Amino acid sequence: MLQNGIDGFVGGQPHWSWVTDGTTFINPLGLVFTLLMGLLLLVLPRKYALLPVIALICYMTMGMRIMVGGLNFPMMRILILFGLARVVVRGEYRSIKLNTIDAAVLWWTLAGIVTGTLLWRTSDAFVSRLGQAYNVIGFYFLFRSLLRGMDDINRVVKFIAILLVPLAGLIVVEKFTGQNLFSAFGGVPPVTFVRDGVVRCQGPFAHPILAGTFGATLLPLFIGLWGQGQKSKFIPLMAIIASTTITISSGSSGPVLAYLAGMLGLGMWYLRKHLRTIRWGLLLTIIALHVVMKAPVWFLMARVDVFSGSTGWHRAYLLDRCIANFSDWWLVGTKSTANWAGEEARLFDVTNQYISEAANGGLLMLGLFIMIIVRCFGGIGRAVRASEGSQQRATSWCLWAMGAALFTHVVSFMSVSYFDQSIVNWYLLLAMISTGAGLFIPASAPADAGAPQPEEVAPLAVQSGLDRAGAIRHA
């Protein structure tokens, strides 16, 4: 039986792996594929080094694992070992210039270890949280070590675009045959799940929602690649079709709504000068709806039903009970969300990333998670303004596309909590934003009467290329 995650907590209950008997499970084909990707990660030039990481995310399930002294090493953790060995031996980690986004990620990771240990007070919980920290630090700072400019970011998006097309083809096969070919690696069922007549494809992912979310959150990046002024639009076009196919084939409402959110975020490019007014208008609208509606405003989620059988009411009720039980989780989290309502409500199924953060680490962990998102949006906003001022139109659009992808994740978090290779996709975007936003540094101002005053926005210079990086300007 598959558990709902890897070394994480669902509904406050610790769970350790896909395989419940605590033993090593290895598929020879999957092991060979993983080791090959690991070797490529070690030997490829830096500009191609992330290609095997992306290949593993797209084509390997998280069903296989190696147990070492009670420690769980699924294949993506094996790949982290290869990646860390590479950046340490080659000294590539020295390229990282820590900024406020990096600091927020580090504080969030540390908070997860501390709150989880305080909540459960067991060595198993401590080891589990260390495993999660290993995932975060390993992948995020591997990406930060290898991504140093917009050229690197665009190249990685192109790699994803190329590899996503065959994945979409395999998911189309699953859609029409009802057979998941990735079950050969273990960790996913061989027969595709059907709910209310809707075939819900999942490919190598742990759940159809995660598969659809993977496709939806990549769409803005592909559209951003489209706008880079390249002569050939074939690769981004095929990637856009592939991401759309994966999103729809999941048969899940959440990914479709996230997909639409990404399109909306991209469309805001034309209204970017008025975003402050739009944000305040949206906030006031939500407050007004909350006042006039009979039910709380978050129950609007219960009315969203793109596909038959969607569980919008469950997500709205889960959020409602989370707010009502604030005293149960605010300090260091809660051991079980099931006690927020009767067992029939199934509130142990935490289908909301924000509530998962709250349940796993209390107000501190939730606050730091939101801080990461806020700092990413802030960095993107400053970078877009700076690049426009430097007449870097293509760079501005690429940065905006990353912001739209971030918004897609923000919306998606309302319907799912990440727990398989989807977390790698999330950490990659954070690293891309941290790198992209950090490429803009204050230019030297002329020491004369015409120099801009401190309260004015000074011109910013753009650093780009493969071997240059900077830190986000601290206002």
Image (cartoon, grey):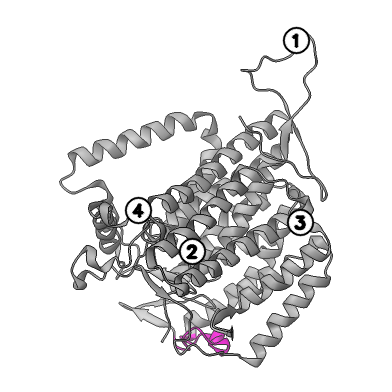
Q: Is residue 379 left or right of residue 179?
A: right
Mark 4 vs mark 3: give the one in front: 4
Kind of element beneath mark 4: loop
Disc with the residue nearer the chain's start (2 vs 3): 3
Kind of element beneath mark 1: loop
Type of amino acid at the residue the image marks with label 3: Tyr
Q: Position of residue 336 (x, y in %)?
A: 30, 68
Name the residue that disc number 4 marks: 331
Kind of element beneath mark 2: helix
Type of amino acid at the residue the image marks with label 4: Leu
Disc with the residue nearer the chain's start (2 vs 1): 2
Do the residues bearing badges 2 and 3 touch, measured as CB atoms within 8 Å?
Answer: no
Do the residues bearing badges 1 and 3 touch, measured as CB atoms within 8 Å?
Answer: no
Is 179 contained in the magenta span?
Answer: yes
Mark 2 vs mark 3: give the one in front: 3
Local crowd size for mark 2, using a 10 Å CA cut-off: few (<14), some (14–19), many (≥20): many
Query: If the image is split into quadrants, where does the C terminus sit?
Result: top right
Q: Which residues are magenta?
A: 177-191
Q: Position of residue 330 (x, y in %)?
A: 33, 52
Name the residue that disc number 1 marks: 450
Distance, label 4 to label 1, CA atoms, is 53 Å
